[in-house]
Image (tube, rainbow, N blue to C red):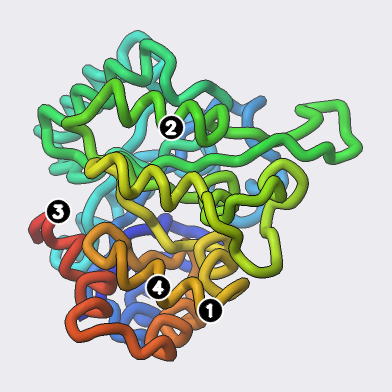
Amino acid sequence: MIIDVHNHPDWYGYNAERLLANMDENGISKTWILTWECPEDEYNPEFLAVCPGGPKGPIPLSSAIAYVERSPDRFVLGFAPDPRRPEAVDRLAFAVSLYGVRVYGELKLRMMYDNPDALRMFRFCAEKNLPVILHIDYEFETGARYPRPNWWYGGGIEALERALKACPDTVFIGHGPGFWAHISGDDKYAREAYPKGKVEDGGKVVEMLRQYPNLYCDLSGESGYNALNRDQEFAKTFLSEFQDRILFGRDFFDSRLLDLLRSFSLPDGALEKILYANALRLVPC
């Protein structure tokens, strides 16, 4: 069994039929199908070439609901309304009761993840047993001025750590370049989205996993793959130590992460935890 904990509806031209076929080709039993709600001026408009778009952001709830209604046995519904909106908690509560939302994700916004509105939302997620998938990106100059000079999200690893402390009953699942760059203790996270080279001791991701039992990791996207592939010897140790809190995800439709994980010859049971057992523990389905 394999569970992909991070994918999106109509993402990069994959409609429901095409995604289901892709899941079958890769042996994936279930996919967490996630929204991305975001104000129009907070995301790169180039994303509109690869996702549906709408008044609430690049990937609306309606698109994710359509997938779950099409194949309820294959998709787990995620939804992350913008917590800065006054109606956000009510919208999420309604979606949980009416549509069966099981995950709060993907949260990807230009805000500090420990602001009071976010913390209120995270505590509500704990009440509803919804794990929170959040994306972190640092500032990198793009050479543009409008609509934004850069695309940062989350406020950095320190904001996540403050949220972990403030919401100990909430399960947080870290994701994105600004999260995975901190697998290493160097300062490349501030200069490179996808750092290369050997992993150095003292990475904040490692330290926080050891300190905060409510932190999990989402391997999806280029960032998760890069974090493991940049130093495969370290990756084997990392995956073994934290095998109970690492989740397989793709955020795309290829098999390279799965191939990489299978090449590591991990301890008995570790790969199964990463590929599906940890996801089932968080979201039984």
- Separation of disc 1 and disc 2 at Cα? 26 Å
Comparing 68 with 239, the one in front is: 239
Residue at image mark 4: 237
Dot 4 or dot 2: first in sequence order is 2
What amino acid type is highlighted by mark number 1?
Gln
Q: Considering depth in this image, is 166 or 234 the residue closer to the camera?
A: 234
Task: Mark 2 or mark 3: name the one nearer the start of the chain.
Answer: 2
**Circle 4 or circle 2, nearest the eye:** 4
Callout 4 amino acid? Thr
Residue type, mark 2 in image = Leu
The image shows residue 227 at horizontal and vertical percentages of 55, 64
Q: Residue at x 23, y 69 (%)?
A: 30
- Within 10 Å of disc 3 (Cα), the crowding (few <14, some 14-19, many 20+) is some
Residue situated in front as seen by the camera: 130 or 160:
160
Q: Which residue is mark 3?
A: 283
Q: Which residue, given by chain and number where applicable, does mark 1 sit on?
A: 232
Which residue was labeled with disc 2?
Answer: 160
Residue drawn at (74%, 51%) of the image: 192
Q: From the image, which quarter does the N terminus lie in?
A: bottom left
Q: Considering the image in quadrants, where does the C terminus appear? A: bottom left
